[in-house]
Amino acid sequence: MPLLLIIVLVVLIAQIGFWDTLGAVLGAAAMIVLLVVLVGAAVAIGGYMLFQRVRR
């Protein structure tokens, strides 16, 4: 019986660690995607402003 309790505790601790790690990895990936979107928007706005200036 104590062996089963230890195994259940190990599985629970591993699950908590797994979900924390997965959340951290997904959060990092989301930050990279957000950075790429912001850089793309800045380039698009800069290109539009440059296009307007050249057109005048």
Image (cartoon, rainbow, N blue to C red):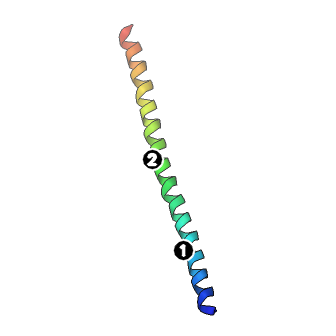
The spot of residue 22 in percent (x, y) is 51, 61
Q: Which mark is residue 32?
A: 2
Task: Work out which residue is located at the far left of the displayed protein and give it.
Answer: 54
Task: Work out which residue is located at the far top of the displayed protein and give it.
Answer: 56
- Image quadrant assignment for residue 4: bottom right
Q: Residue at x 63, y 92 (%)?
A: 2
Q: What crowding class fits label 1: few (fewer than 14 Cα within 10 Å), some (14-19), or many (20 or more)?
A: few
The spot of residue 3 in percent (x, y) is 59, 91
Q: Secondary structure at mark 2?
A: helix
Quadrant the C terminus occupies: top left
Q: Residue at x 60, y 81 (%)?
A: 8
- Image quadrant assignment for residue 55: top left
Image vertical order of residue 3 relative to residue 22, above or below: below
The spot of residue 5 in percent (x, y) is 63, 86
- Image quadrant assignment for residue 33: top left
- Which amino acid is tagged 1? Ala
Quadrant the N terminus occupies: bottom right
**Which label sits in the foreground, 2 or 1?**
1
